[in-house]
Amino acid sequence: MDHLLTIDSAEFDGGSARAWLPEEDRPVVGTIFDLPYEQRHAIQSAPDLMIGDMGGVYVFMCPRCPGQPYAYRSDCS
């Protein structure tokens, strides 16, 4: 199966493997950690959803199989 989609509770977690920060949310000067907590929290929780305990859902599918079966897995951070 191929990884199709990840739905995560946070877009940005501070620098681990899941770190992804949209270009428009990056500060012009300094780093994200130089921003006040309220701004940093608003950027981190932009999707405004909670999966488990800040976890994610991972969707997989097989485009080569008849009926294109799919599966999903979830985790809690």
Image: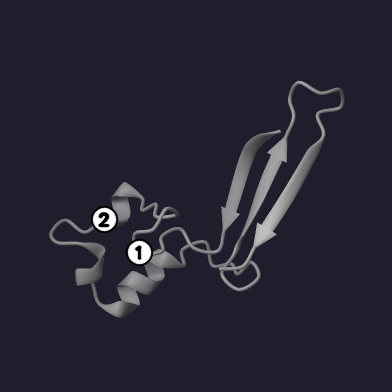
User: Which percent across, then down, holds residue 71?
Assistant: 77, 44
Q: Quadrant of residue 76?
A: bottom right
| Residue 2 vs residue 34, the one in the foreground | 2
Q: Quadrant of the C terminus?
A: bottom right
- Residue 8: percent from the left, percent from the top? 56, 58
Residue sitting at 55 percent across and 64 percent down? 9
Which x, y percent locates residue 63?
Answer: 73, 25
Colour scheme used in the picture? Answer: one colour
Mark 1 crowd level (few <14, some 14–19, many ≥20, 10 Å Cα): some
User: Quadrant location of residue 27?
Assistant: bottom left
Which residue is the site of mark 1?
A: 14
Q: Is residue 29 left or right of residue 24?
A: left
Precedes in sequence: disc 2 or disc 1: 1
Above or below, 67 relative to 34: above
Asked where in the image residue 15 lies, by quadrant, the reply is: bottom left
Which residue corresponds to mark 2? 26
Estimate the x, y position of residue 58 in percent, counting from the top left: 65, 49
Q: Secondary structure at mark 2?
A: loop
